């Protein structure tokens, strides 16, 4: 379908596609198997100016649309969702600064990312997954700085990011108004890392624990206002969850394409299996779901680009596309049969990669709660 | 200002071109025109030198029909500062002597070459003659098949060039011309800013007269060589033993033959 | 001013469109009435004129006429490449076509040898292999090949001697040197010739070479300029039989290279680490293409090459993907080989590759695809998976 992307959006998509097909495809199997962080690909993405897409022009960026960024994420994820995450995860850690940062903070961090610096967003803890209120990391004021103590879990780009946006409790008595976002530079004394997680999928991305031990941070590193941490996080996620949608679309499309190509070549009973109606119905259903998810995602992105934005819709896009990615990779692998199951073929990796999209940046159960609560409120 | 000229050519993608044995012609449907692959490596080397030296200016130069400006746009999207298209009906039918003459005139017209880079050869003509020809017209020393620029100063360079046995290290005074091989680097991909710049880019369009090229030295008139005829390559007739079957069967036949031929 | 270009003779044209599809440059299109018109990209290569079965296309142009004293030129000269003070094999190979052309043109064969002190000792070898005379240019600064100095020496010698034909090997030296010489002398050069002959009506040199990645062959002339220059790939021409008559003139041409030597010097010459024999000298080559390019299969091919006392070759696709270094590449943009036995594993046999190996004495091809073009060339065609065949072959040895 023709989504009528602008010339610049198409340029971004083509640039990301070229990087994905020429540079990521040849290494994705190895990086996945050995859990290697794609430093070389990050450099190539930076040289291609992909990081400048979501940075405003005043800060060395190109100030392009959310649609453009999602197109980049989708194309990169088509080749490898794990490698794409170094890019998408950075946007998650950077968008809060674009949205809420002070002028000094923007001038300090945004050009860094524009040139290929990496970022991370740290909310999740052992006791705080879907229940963000369960955050226990404490930030205690001490003169004109704060001392942070606590442990963050499952942080994307943990250990490789140049800075971390960390949510900590500054006032335990104020509930949803008691958390604050801090920007912490790598190398700050007290910022330590736990082991690198050994994951089912997206294995080329770095996922680590952050251990904050008497981490001292000046008050100037507060992002937004003290007490606004949770509010800001929600506002950020309302947008960035579309990034997961784009990632899911990339995975799903790659799986579908591989299955269709395979079905055209593979012959059984004297015919290509693509002629069997049973498989044709499967392929049609897969394609329908992907296109529906894509239309929803890019409609939501266009809305945001034009100044709007509806959290109910972005939640729908995230939930629908990620469920689709999981379903499509399972069916695509089925179509590829025994070959699909072998590590020599990329399908089993895509299936392993897909699962996390239903979980992170808000589980699909949380997405459904969001959708329902908006529905109930809005329906009159 | 250190001017690095990169001579580039738009060529049909000959790896995709097939010969129609029935019709006795080339099958060209859907074959794209591309930037000659070796020239991409030449451009990349020029850009790498520019990355390290702000005084460097990279000028892409091509001789061809108007559509050749597509490859100049591509060079700009990769980082070239300028693009020059030498285009004139008078250039039609140029062989390598006439082509290298015209390109050398364009370089002189733009002025002050510090380094001239070219790819080892163009994948359509495959002659590898234009680079050295340009060097000769300009009176420059040359190094062909360069696989590494080891060191670079304003007045001289040390390069490694491929030989049949291995390689040679050569010290050469600048200005000079280098033709490069693929071992020299890995070309970058165009950046977004590069593509945006290329979108609004217009090449300098120069005619034969503008660069002071004499009419008798260009085009068909300036070409000592002429094509007499073109034909399909001879197909070698094999002895024609053909074996199909399981790998074991094939392997057995091969090992028998190898012993028969006294190779084993 | 004469009109230059390709024109359709409409009376003869049957509007079949064969010319349009033959054009390597997409420079022809059909106009509203069905006749071909030439677009801007036309390079006057003449392919369409050839492709027309009805002689309905003609090429007109004011061809270059300013010759370089063609009436006074004589002699077939060859460039005797030397390395480390010894003439190379290709230097001798050049004397084969040289002799043939000299005889056809009723003229003499002369070799040109440039090198450092003592190089004249090699001149006799050239005479033993057929040269009637040898010009020697000897100077300590010329010990290593220097493109510019050698070209200048040749230019000065040729102004004096005025050869009709000048041949050389399309080697690293030849490809750097010959275009400089042809440009200095303002004459024509055809690279990588596979065949040379004499046009009986005119006595002109017929220079035949592959073009378009080996997809077509072209025969080229240099009718009005001298010398007519051509390079030939190594291993295409046979080595001439040495003879015992020692009647040959050895002449010395004085030359001072100092003007060019301070612009360039060779610091060192390094031989690359080769595991085994260099490709060009191998009598057996086991070559891999895309269909045999996974690392395990490369390993097998390499082992087979070793077992047979040969070398490993590769198609361009495999070299481009970084699996094997460029020096193993066989084909149009790689090396031309002519071993006793060439075993092509998983190579489709595209023309660009064929050009580099079709002079092999025996060709064995292993490929999954029963219609692979390599099978048209092969003496023994094995239709199967290269890796599996190699595995079992090595097990059995």
Image: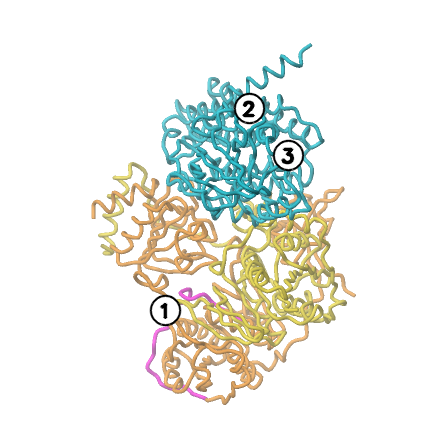
Residue C236 within the magenta-colored segment of the rendering: yes
Chain in orange, by letter, is C
In front of the other: B90 or A211: A211
Q: Position of residue C159 (x, y in %)?
A: 58, 84
Marked residue nearer the N-terminal end (3 or 2): 3
> Is residue A263 found left or right of C23 in the rendered image?
left
Q: Residue at x 39, y 54 (%)?
A: C324
Which is closer to the viewer, label 1 or label 2? 2
Q: CA distance from mark 3 to mark 2?
A: 35 Å
Q: Quadrant of the C terminus of chain B?
A: bottom left
Choose top left, top right, bottom left or bottom right for residue B125: bottom right
Chain letter, disc 3 residue: A
Boundaries of the magenta span:
C229-251
Q: Is residue A316 above or below residue B78?
A: above
Which is closer to the viewer, label 3 or label 1? 3
* Mark 1 lies on residue: C271
Chain letter, disc 1 residue: C
Q: Quadrant of the N terminus of chain B?
A: bottom right
Q: Position of residue C58 (x, y in %)?
A: 69, 56
Look at the numbered disc 2 and give the secondary structure of its residue: helix
* Mark 2 lies on residue: A175
* Residue C23 visible, this orientation: yes
């Amino acid at each position: 379908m023709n989504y009528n992307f602008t010339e610049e959006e198409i340029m971004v998509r083509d640039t990301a596609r070229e990087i994905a097909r020429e540079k990521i495809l040849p290494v994705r199997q190895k990086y996945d198997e050995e859990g290697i962080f794609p430093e070389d690909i990050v450099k190539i993405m930076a040289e291609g100016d992909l990081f400048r897409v979501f940075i405003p022009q005043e800060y060395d960026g190109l100030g392009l649309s959310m649609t453009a960024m999602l197109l980049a994420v989708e194309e990169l994820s088509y080749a490898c969702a794990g490698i794409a995450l170094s890019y998408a995860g950075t946007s998650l850690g950077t968008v809060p600064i674009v949205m809420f940062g002070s002028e000094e903070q923007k001038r300090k961090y945004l050009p860094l990312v524009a040139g290929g610096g990496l970022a991370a967003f740290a909310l999740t803890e052992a006791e705080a997954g879907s229940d963000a209120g369960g955050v226990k990391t404490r930030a205690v004021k001490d003169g004109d700085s704060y001392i942070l103590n606590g442990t963050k879990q499952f942080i994307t780009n943990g250990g490789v990011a140049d800075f971390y946006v960390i949510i900590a409790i500054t006032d335990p008595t104020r509930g949803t108004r008691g958390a604050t976002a801090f920007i912490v530079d790598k190398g700050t004394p007290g910022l330590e890392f736990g082991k690198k997680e050994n994951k089912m999928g997206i294995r080329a991305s770095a996922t680590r624990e952050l251990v904050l031990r008497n981490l001292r941070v000046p008050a100037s590193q507060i992002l937004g206002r003290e007490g606004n941490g949770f509010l800001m996080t929600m506002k950020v996620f309302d947008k960035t969850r579309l990034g997961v949608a784009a990632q899911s679309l990339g995975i799903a499309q790659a799986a579908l394409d591989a299955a269709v190509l395979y079905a055209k070549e593979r012959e059984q009973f004297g015919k290509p299996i693509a002629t069997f109606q049973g498989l044709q119905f499967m392929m049609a259903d897969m394609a329908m779901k992907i296109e529906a998810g894509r239309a929803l995602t890019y409609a939501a992105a266009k809305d945001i680009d034009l100044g709007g934005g509806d959290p109910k819709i972005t939640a729908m896009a995230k939930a629908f596309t990620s469920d689709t990615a999981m379903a499509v990779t399972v069916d695509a692998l089925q179509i590829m049969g025994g070959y699909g199951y072998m590590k020599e073929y990329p399908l089993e990796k895509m299936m392993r990669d897909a699962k996390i999209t239903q979980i992170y940046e808000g589980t699909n159960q949380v997405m459904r709660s969001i959708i329902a609560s908006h529905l109930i409120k809005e329906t009159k | 200002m250190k001017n690095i000229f990169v001579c580039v050519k738009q060529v049909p993608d000959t790896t995709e071109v097939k010969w129609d044995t029935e019709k006795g012609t080339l099958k060209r449907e859907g074959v794209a025109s591309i930037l000659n692959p070796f020239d991409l490596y030449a451009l990349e080397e020029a850009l790498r030198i520019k990355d390290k030296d702000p005084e460097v200016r990279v000028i892409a130069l091509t001789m061809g029909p108007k559509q050749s400006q597509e490859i100049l746009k591509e060079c700009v999207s990769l980082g070239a500062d300028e693009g020059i298209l030498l285009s004139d009906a008078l250039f039609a039918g140029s062989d390598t002597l006439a082509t290298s003459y015209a390109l050398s005139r364009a370089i002189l017209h733009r002025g002050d070459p510090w380094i001239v880079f070219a790819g080892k050869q163009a994948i359509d003509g495959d002659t590898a003659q234009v680079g050295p020809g340009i060097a000769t017209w300009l009176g420059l020393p040359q190094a062909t098949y360069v696989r590494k620029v080891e060191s670079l100063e304003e007045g001289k360079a040390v390069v490694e060039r491929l030989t049949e046995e291995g390689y040679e290290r050569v010290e050469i005074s600048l200005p000079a011309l280098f033709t490069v091989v693929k071992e020299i680097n890995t070309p970058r991909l165009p950046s977004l800013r590069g593509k945006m710049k290329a979108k609004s880019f217009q090449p300098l369009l120069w005619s034969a007269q503008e660069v002071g090229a004499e009419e008798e030295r260009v085009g068909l008139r300036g070409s000592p060589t002429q094509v007499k005829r073109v034909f399909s390559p001879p197909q070698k007739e094999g002895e024609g033993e053909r074996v199909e079957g399981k790998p074991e069967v094939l392997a057995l036949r091969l090992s028998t033959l190898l012993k028969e031929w006294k190779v084993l | 001013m004469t009109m230059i270009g390709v024109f359709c003779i409409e009376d003869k044209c049957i509007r079949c469109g064969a010319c349009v599809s033959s054009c390597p440059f997409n420079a022809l299109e059909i106009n509203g009435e069905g006749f071909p018109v030439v677009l801007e990209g036309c390079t006057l290569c003449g392919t369409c004129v050839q492709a027309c079965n009805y002689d309905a296309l003609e090429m007109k142009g004011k061809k270059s006429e300013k010759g370089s004293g063609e009436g006074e030129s004589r002699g077939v000269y060859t460039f005797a490449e030397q390395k480390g003070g010894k003439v190379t094999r290709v230097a001798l190979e050049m004397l084969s076509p040289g002799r043939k052309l000299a005889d056809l043109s009723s003229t003499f064969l002369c070799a040109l040898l440039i090198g450092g002190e003592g190089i004249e000792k090699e001149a006799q070898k050239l005479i033993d292999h057929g040269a009637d005379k040898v010009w020697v240019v000897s100077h300590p600064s010329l010990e290593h090949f220097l493109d510019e100095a050698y070209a200048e020496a040749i230019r000065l010698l040729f102004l004096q001697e005025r050869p009709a034909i000048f041949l050389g090997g399309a080697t690293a030296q030849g490809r750097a040197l010959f275009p400089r010489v042809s440009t200095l002398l303002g004459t024509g050069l055809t690279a990588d010739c596979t065949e040379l002959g004499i046009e009986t009506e005119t006595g002109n040199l017929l220079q035949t070479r592959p073009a378009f990645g080996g997809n077509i062959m072209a025969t080229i002339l240099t009718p009005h300029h001298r010398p007519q220059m051509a390079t030939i790939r190594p291993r295409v021409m046979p080595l001439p039989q040495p003879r015992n008559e020692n009647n040959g003139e050895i002449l010395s041409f004085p030359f001072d290279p100092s003007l060019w030597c301070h612009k360039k010097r060779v610091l060192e010459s390094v031989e690359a680490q080769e595991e085994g024999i260099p490709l060009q000298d191998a009598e057996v080559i086991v070559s891999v293409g895309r269909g045999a390019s996974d690392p395990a299969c490369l390993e097998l091919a390499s082992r087979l090459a070793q077992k047979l006392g040969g070398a490993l070759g590769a198609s361009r696709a495999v070299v481009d993907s970084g699996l094997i270094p460029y020096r193993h590449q066989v084909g149009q943009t790689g090396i031309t080989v002519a071993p006793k036995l060439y075993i092509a594993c998983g190579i489709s046999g595209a023309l660009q590759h064929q050009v580099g190996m079709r002079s092999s004495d025996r060709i064995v091809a292993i490929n999954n695809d029963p219609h692979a073009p390599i099978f048209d060339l092969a003496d023994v065609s094995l239709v199967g998976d290269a890796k599996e065949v190699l595995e079992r072959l090595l097990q059995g040895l």
